[in-house]
Amino acid sequence: MIRSTVFSTLVCLLLFSCAQEPPKEAVANAAELAQWAKYKAEGWKNHGCELISDAEVETLFAFNGKEATLNARQLPNQAFCLRTWNKPDWKERETNNEKEGASWLNPQNRLVVQLFDYTSEEHAKQQIQNLRRDRRTTYEEDVPGLGEDALWSTSTVTLLVRKGQFVVNIALEVSDTPHDNLAKAKDAAALALKKL
């Protein structure tokens, strides 16, 4: 009898608490938190393009995706996303590239976002330390103030940022001067880090 009374009381309390509508902001935040919790539980495989959304890319680089032919491609069973879109002067660049002896100008911008899950913070730290030690001529620049550790490679226009057990790899080609891509790569990495 006591068990059934306690059970009935708990059921009534649960129903009462569910009957009250939470504020709209709480519902939106709860949905967003549930989405990121799902990725943490299931991993980011096959969700690489959600680390930085199309809308975030358009805002970050100030362009209209439809007009610039924004294209996103993922790799199966990986946390990987390749986005390309036309530069504003893509037609002139293609015309230039057809001229004999002209220096080649890329008509497209490229953003690659890849997430590596090393399953432990210690393994992720070790990976960054190994790159710093063994491939310092490639990853020549430390990037302070981003994640828990970050390295930049001008030759591969790649930024690596560690947060916990994760390393975010951002490869970005929007500027014709390779090192000038670092500033926007840092902004892109900051967007992805918020979701980890």
Image (spheres, rainbow, N blue to C red):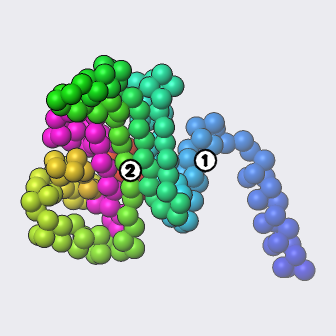
Image position, residue 34 (x, y; %): 58, 54
Image position, residue 137 (x, y; %): 9, 59
Q: Residue shown at 47%/33% (left/top)?
A: 70
Residue at label 2? 113
Residue 114 lies left or right of residue 144; in this view the side is right
Q: Which residue lies furthest to the right in this view?
A: 1
Q: Which of marks 2 and 1 is nearer the N terminus?
A: 1
- Density class for disc 2 (Cα within 10 Å; few <14, some 14-19, many ≥20) is many
Front-most of 163 and 18? 163
Q: Residue furthest front?
A: 100
Q: Is residue 173 magenta?
A: yes
Label 2 is placed on what type of residue? Val
| 32 lies above or below 56 | below
Mark 2 secondary-structure assignment:
strand
Image position, residue 52 (x, y; %): 43, 44
Front-most of 94 and 135? 94
Q: Residue shown at 30%/48% (left/top)?
A: 171
Separation of disc 2 and disc 1 at Cα? 24 Å
The residue segment tinted magenta is: 162-188
| 90 lies above or below 149 | above
Residue at label 1? 31
Q: Can the viewer see residue 17?
A: yes
Q: Does the magenta stretch include residue 163?
A: yes
Q: Residue shown at 22%/33% (left/top)?
A: 104
